[in-house]
């Protein structure tokens, strides 16, 4: 008797409705957990009678919305130019250092935007290396003797964010270039087109979908940032939510601004879909030997220009922050013995570890449910659950705080009336709300990693296990989970590292006496004591290097498999 039994002329499926009912309920609850903050936020913005709206519409929103759009426009243009050129050079040309530069160009992703802002402000301040060198060279004595651009400005925010976020464009564009092969370029060159003309008229249009995806990811991270823009004094919508909530005490006003941010996020997503509505990635391939032989060699000044064109983004996005913060940290290694820093390290590890476990578990539930049910409803639930990554951290924090606070108040009132016990703030007064926020925001990341692992397991393996007598639980625990261990580890590591770096939601949701590495750095940088935060900042960047190396290795392996 096999798993498929004949009953009344019909074949019983390997997974009956009763077997996936629990999975469906779990997936629905997971999607609901992602949607609850959004629904709570919308409900709060519509409550309160709109007393704050006239002030916000007149004095806050025009400036914040204009600044946000200007920052996003600048980041889109700069990240595109910084990501496309190195992707083109490393994909189609051979020059000194190309192999090392190809993976090193991803390193700026290890630097959170707020750490980059702290490092650049220190480097370009009056007493920093840049202005000190200018005064030494030209004999200037005071700042009135010369002009120097102010890094704490809108243009400074655009440049700093772009230096850190350009790898999103680089990764997607380079992957598209590598998958295109040389055919289209060779045809263009045969028809008399120069390399530059072939780049603009052939390669760029073919890679446009990948470029748009990379720019969209960079813009999502721009909207999520609160530490960098606040430190640089740039009044974006994100900082407006923060100041309206905490400084002015207007929860309704903050919710209304957060809803405007959601509209901006939705606009970015729709613009991305519209821009590539008729575009498809070209998946033409060439063998690895053909690709190596077809790389055009650059030597002399052309090779040097290509080398420095790829090196400068690495120096700007990774080298300078490590130089500044690492230089401070080397002189303050004794801070590792500071109990406050040790507590922050322990808190970061515990909270990020708990968030990784929860997120990986939920991501596995969603992907496994989709695998066994193969229904459109389950696919829709998966897409709802992935919405968290598109929600900026400040918006997510505000949406989470409202339902959790109301639940705490309800529970406290019920316990007092029923048992005379005061429970206080069980959820909002603990790290659980931060774990909740991290799980919602990074669920899409973990789901992608586990889904990639499932794609490597043919569906007939499940059927074979059932045919050999194993029930669904045994098939899952004895067959699928052992195969998926690398995917679990990858997903967990990605969530863990991003949890350590996370600041935008943590800074708003943290309870009293809560300090993680990110908030430890944020508090000291806010007091203009970046030097005292350098050891913690260096630890965050060192932790961020691990997933970057994994990402580079996986991309190189994937390209190698595609080329063979």
Image (cartoon, grey):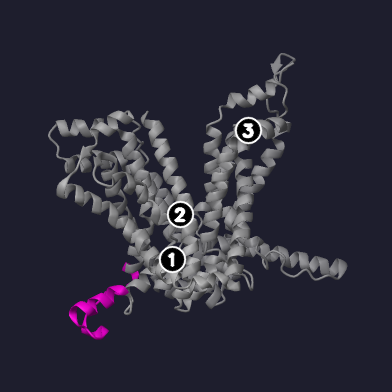
What residue is disc 2 on?
Answer: 545
In the displayed image of the protein, which residue is found farthest to the left?
192
Which comes sooner in the sequence, label 2 or label 1? 1
Determine the residue located farthest toward the top in the rendered image: 9
Q: Nearer the viewer, residue 185 or 91?
A: 91
Identify the image quadrant of the N terminus.
top right
Say if residue 35 shows up in the picture: no
- Of tags 2 and 1, the one toward the viewer is 2
The residue that appears at 52% across and 66% down in the rendered structure is 518
Q: CA distance from mark 2 to mark 1?
A: 14 Å
Q: Is residue 52 above or below residue 185?
A: below
Mark 3 surroundings within 10 Å by alpha-carbon count, few (fewer than 14), some (14 through 19), many (20 or more) = some
Q: Secondary structure at mark 2?
A: helix
Q: In this view of the protein, can residue 452 be seen by the observer?
A: yes
Residues at marks 3 and 1 touching, judged by CB atoms closer than 8 Å:
no
Query: Along the line of sight, which residue is nearer the eye, 543 or 372?
Result: 543
Q: Is residue 137 magenta?
A: yes
Residue at 64% across, 41% down:
365
How far separated are the C-alphas under marks 2 and 3? 30 Å
The range drawn in magenta is 129-155
Q: Are marks 2 and 1 in contact (CB under 8 Å)?
A: no
As for residue 52 lying within the magenta part, the answer is no
Helix, strand, or loop for circle 3? Answer: helix
Q: Which residue is mark 1?
A: 115
Q: Position of residue 547 (x, y in %)?
A: 48, 50
């Amino acid at each position: 008797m096999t798993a498929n039994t004949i009953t009344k002329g019909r074949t019983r499926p390997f997974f009956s409705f009763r077997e996936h009912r629990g999975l469906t309920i779990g997936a629905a609850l997971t999607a609901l957990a992602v949607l609850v903050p959004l629904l709570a936020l919308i409900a709060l913005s519509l409550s309160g009678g709109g007393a704050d709206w006239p002030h916000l519409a007149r004095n806050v929103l025009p400036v914040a919305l204009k600044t946000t759009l200007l920052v996003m426009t600048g980041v889109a243009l700069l990240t595109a130019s910084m990501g496309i050129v190195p992707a083109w050079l490393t994909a189609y040309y051979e020059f000194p250092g190309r192999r090392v530069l190809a993976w090193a160009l991803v390193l700026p992703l290890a630097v959170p935007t707020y750490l980059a802002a702290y490092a650049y402000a220190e480097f370009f301040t009056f007493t920093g290396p840049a202005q000190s060198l200018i005064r030494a060279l030209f004999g200037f004595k005071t700042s009135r003797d010369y002009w120097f651009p102010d890094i704490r400005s809108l243009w400074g925010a655009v440049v700093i964010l772009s230096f850190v976020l350009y790898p999103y464009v680089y990764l997607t564009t380079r992957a598209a270039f590598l998958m295109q092969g040389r055919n289209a370029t060779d045809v263009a060159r045969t028809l008399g087109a120069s390399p530059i003309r072939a780049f603009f008229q052939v390669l760029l249009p073919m890679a446009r979908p990948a470029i748009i995806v990379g720019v969209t990811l960079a813009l999502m991270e721009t909207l999520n940032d609160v530490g960098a823009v606040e430190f640089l004094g740039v009044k974006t919508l994100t900082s407006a939510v923060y100041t309206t909530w905490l400084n002015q005490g207007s929860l309704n006003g903050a919710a209304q601004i957060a809803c405007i941010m959601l509209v901006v996020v939705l606009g970015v997503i729709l613009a991305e879909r519209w821009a590539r509505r008729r575009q498809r990635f070209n998946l033409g391939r060439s063998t690895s030997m053909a690709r190596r032989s077809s790389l055009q060699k650059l030597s002399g000044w052309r090779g040097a220009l290509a080398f420095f064109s790829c090196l400068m983004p690495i120096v700007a996005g990774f080298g300078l922050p490590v130089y500044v913060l690492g230089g401070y940290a080397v002189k303050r290694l004794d801070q590792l013995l500071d109990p406050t820093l040790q507590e922050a390290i322990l808190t970061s590890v515990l909270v990020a570890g708990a968030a990784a476990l929860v997120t990986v578990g939920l991501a596995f539930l969603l992907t496994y449910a989709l695998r066994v049910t193969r229904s459109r409803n389950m696919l829709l639930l998966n897409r709802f659950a992935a919405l968290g990554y598109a929600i900026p951290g400040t918006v997510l924090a505000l949406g989470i705080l409202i339902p959790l606070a109301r639940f705490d108040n309800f529970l406290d009132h019920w316990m007092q009336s029923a048992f005379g016990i005061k429970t206080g703030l069980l959820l909002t007064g603990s790290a659980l709300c931060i774990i909740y926020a991290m799980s919602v925001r990074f669920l899409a990341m973990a789901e992608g990693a586990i889904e990639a692992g499932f794609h490597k397991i043919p569906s007939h393996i499940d059927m074979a296990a059932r045919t050999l007598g194993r029930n669904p639980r045994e098939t899952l625990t004895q067959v699928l989970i052992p195969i998926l261990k690398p995917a679990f580890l990858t997903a967990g590591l990605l969530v863990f590292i991003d949890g350590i770096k996370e600041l935008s939601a943590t800074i708003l949701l943290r309870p009293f006496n809560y300090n993680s590495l990110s908030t430890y750095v944020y508090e000291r940088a806010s007091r203009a004591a970046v030097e005292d935060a350098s050891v913690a900042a260096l630890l965050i960047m060192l932790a961020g290097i691990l997933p970057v190396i994994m990402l580079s290795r996986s991309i190189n392996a994937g390209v190698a498999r595609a080329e063979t």
